[in-house]
Every structure is written in C-alpha cells, then in structure tokens.
Amino acid sequence: MQKLTQLEEDLFDLAEKLGVGTHGSDICLRAIRKIQELEGEVTDLTAKNTDMGWRLNPDRMGGQFSEWETNRRGDEWS
C-alpha cells in the first residue's frame, strides 16, 4: 500500500469523525480526486491571470508609473 499524503490522512480522519466514510472509502477517494483536480485548475487560472495582467497593463504589474502619473499635478485630489 502506498503512503498516504497529509491531505488524504486529514480527509479520511474528518470523514470518520463526521460519520460519512471510513478510511479509504469511496466518498473520500472521490473528494481527494476533486480537490486535486481543482488544485490544478487554480494553478492554471493563476498563471493565465498573471499573463493577462502583464499583457493588459505592463506598467502596473511592474509597479511602475505611467508618464502621465509621473507628470501629473499633486493637487488634483483637493
């Protein structure tokens, strides 16, 4: 039997405490697969979001100011 990850151990323990499954039960295994699937989707979406941010507004992503922001007057908020 392969060594369980911490996520698997925690989920099996939680299912047993809640009375909805036992160690290695199908419900736990389905939940683990779903969590792993969602984890992959979050990783992909984070990468796409970062790339999109760079493409849409490269000045902001680098923490730089645009020329307009650098040259604007400081009293426009008063």
Image (cartoon, rainbow, N blue to C red):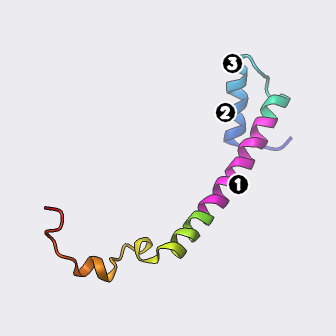
Is residue 21 or residue 61 the one in the foreground?
61
Gap between marks 2 and 1, in whole Å?
20 Å
> Between tags 2 and 1, which lies in front?
1
Q: Amino acid at mark 1?
A: Gly
Q: Position of residue 17 (x, y in %)?
A: 68, 19
Q: Amino acid at mark 3?
A: Leu
Decide: few, some or many residues near mark 3? Use Cα within 10 Å; few <14, some 14-19, many ≥20. Answer: few
Q: Main secondary structure of the magenta part?
A: helix
Residue 75, image quadrant: bottom left
- Seen in the picture, residue 66 relative to 41 is either above or below; the reply is below
Residue where numbered disc 1 is placed: 40
Circles 3 and 1: CB distance less than 8 Å? no
What residue is drawn where x is 57% and y is 69%? 52
Which numbered disc flags the more N-terminal residue, 2 or 1? Answer: 2
Residue 27, image quadrant: top right
- Seen in the picture, residue 61 relative to 8 is either above or below; the reply is below
Q: Position of residue 31 (x, y in %)?
A: 76, 36
Gap between marks 2 and 3, in whole Å?
12 Å
